């Protein structure tokens, strides 16, 4: 908190400048067709048919992951029973809002209750003190904050636009790669089955494969459309039975352990199964170095490169693709990230609450295939381009972090009386 105050400033408690209330409804009170905003403890508001609150108000989640967030709204709305509302504010509302934006979360980090679900109490609000200058000073501070934030927001918007452009570029690189536009090998025609003997794995014969898709792009000479199962030793998923949890043993991976931003597994927050359970699993349900995992339920369409040796197993919401020796693992990994493959996942996914790509659909994805020498070249071409994109993304991420730090610095100066 701020200790030294400028002349004419004073310390006040939150209850001295506003009315502190909570909503009275549960989450089922929301209605899609509602006229008024309905604030819960989520980051996004819903809608409802009631409007207990009116005018300038500050809304603060009272439990869950968003405790510490602060929202401002001027209008008619209602709130969830664990959401706190500050209204009937007798000082500059925006001044109070910006102070809470700068200090509320930090102030309450170690003042939360509960174990399964964290929450705050009315005492967190009634005990909260903040520095209050005369009204003209409050208004001048708000004006200066909003002027600086406006310039900062413009810069952030440009950074986010650049971030989105890089994502678009990544998808373009993957699209070009699997259209043969990134490589320069001569595309001499070859017979996929004769050369690679794909049929030895009982996964089907690409020459017997009938084209059921009308949207296939024309492939370079020597490439061929095949089903995914024809270039894999096996395509399986995790155990369909609920695994017996154990205090120690082998990590068990669920969808929540997959980071969709970097396509990696977070092993720091998994539960374990016993060594005995793990040993009884079929070999095609035990990931090996060289495999590619592929999420098939909920956040479907995320491939994970298993380029390490580690015993672990996974839930049935994740698929496993074990490539043939004649299929480059990294080539397969990038192929499964390509727009064409994701569109097939999207079009075949079924279900309402959680969309699922059936294992049979995954096995029958139609993909372009080329000689392994060209697969190596494609991987090199992709990685040389994506490495540049990675560096740009890292630079943008650092700039966004600096922007947030600058925002906090502006608020800190403002409430020490050093901004105006």
Image: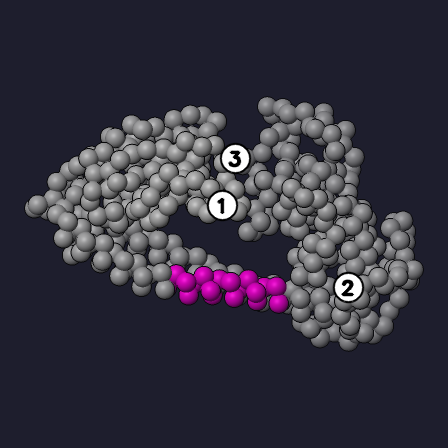
Q: Which residue is mark 3?
A: 28
Count neighbours of disc 3 (C-alpha within 10 A) and say few if under 14, some if 14 to 19, many if 20 or more: few
Was residue 384 drawn as part of the magenta stretch in this picture? Answer: no
Callout 1: 10 Å neighbours few (<14), some, many (20+)? some
The image position of residue 186, as x and y in percent, is 77, 76
Element under disc 3: helix
Question: Could you tell me what secondary structure mostly forms the magenta stretch?
Answer: helix
Front disc: 1 or 3? 1
State the image coordinates of residue 323 (x, y, percent, origin top left).
Answer: 77, 51
393 to the left or right of 77:
right
Q: Earlier in the sequence, mark 2 or mark 1?
A: 1
Look at 55% across and 51% down and name the residue there.
261
Q: Is residue 336 visible?
A: no
**Looking at the image, is 133 positioned above or below residue 21?**
below
Q: Report the residue marked by disc 1.
A: 34
Residue segment shown in magenta: 155-172
Q: Residue at x 8, y 45 (%)?
A: 8
Q: Quadrant of residue 61?
A: top left
Residue designated by label 2? 368
Q: Is residue 418 left or right of residue 178?
A: left
* Count of numbered tags: 3
Question: Closer to the observer: label 2 or label 1?
Answer: 1
């Amino acid at each position: 908190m701020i200790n030294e105050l400028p002349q004419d400033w004073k310390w006040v408690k939150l209850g001295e400048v506003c009315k502190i209330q909570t909503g009275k409804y549960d989450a089922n009170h929301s209605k899609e067709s509602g006229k008024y905003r309905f604030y819960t403890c989520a980051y996004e508001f819903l809608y409802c048919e009631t409007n207990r609150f009116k005018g300038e108000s500050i809304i603060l989640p009272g439990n869950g992951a968003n405790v510490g967030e602060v929202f401002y709204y001027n209008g008619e709305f209602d709130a969830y029973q664990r959401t706190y509302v500050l209204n009937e504010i007798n000082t500059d509302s925006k001044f109070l809002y910006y102070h809470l934006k700068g200090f509320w979360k930090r102030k309450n980090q170690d003042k939360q209750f509960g174990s399964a679900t964290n929450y705050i109490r009315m005492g967190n609000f009634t005990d909260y003190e903040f520095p209050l200058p005369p009204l003209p000073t409050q208004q001048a501070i708000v004006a200066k904050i909003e002027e600086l934030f406006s310039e900062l927001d413009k810069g952030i918007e440009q950074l986010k636009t650049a971030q989105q452009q890089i994502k678009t570029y990544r998808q373009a690189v993957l699209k070009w790669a699997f259209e043969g536009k990134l490589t320069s090998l001569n595309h001499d025609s070859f017979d996929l089955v004769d050369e690679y003997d794909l049929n030895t794995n009982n996964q089907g014969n690409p020459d017997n494969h009938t084209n059921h898709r009308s949207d296939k792009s024309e492939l370079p000479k020597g490439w061929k459309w095949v089903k995914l199962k024809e270039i894999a030793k096996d395509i399986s998923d995790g155990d369909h039975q609920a695994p017996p949890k154990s205090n120690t043993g082998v990590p068990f991976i669920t969808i929540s352990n997959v980071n969709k931003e970097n396509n990696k597994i977070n092993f720091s927050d998994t539960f374990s199964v016993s060594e005995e359970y793990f040993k009884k699993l079929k070999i095609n349900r035990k990931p090996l170095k060289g495999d590619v995992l592929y999420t098939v339920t909920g956040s479907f369409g995320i491939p994970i490169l298993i380029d390490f040796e580690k015993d672990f197993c996974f839930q049935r919401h994740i698929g496993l693709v074990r490539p043939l020796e004649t299929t480059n693992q990294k080539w397969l990994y990038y192929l499964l990230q390509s727009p064409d493959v994701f569109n097939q996942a999207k079009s075949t996914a079924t279900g309402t609450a959680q969309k699922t790509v059936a294992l049979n659909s995954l096995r029958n994805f139609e993909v372009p295939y080329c000689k392994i020498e060209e697969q190596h070249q494609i991987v090199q071409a992709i990685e040389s381009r994506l490495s540049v994109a990675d560096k740009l993304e890292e630079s943008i991420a650092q700039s966004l972090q600096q922007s947030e730090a600058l925002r906090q610095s502006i608020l800190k100066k403002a409430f020490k009386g050093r901004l105006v």
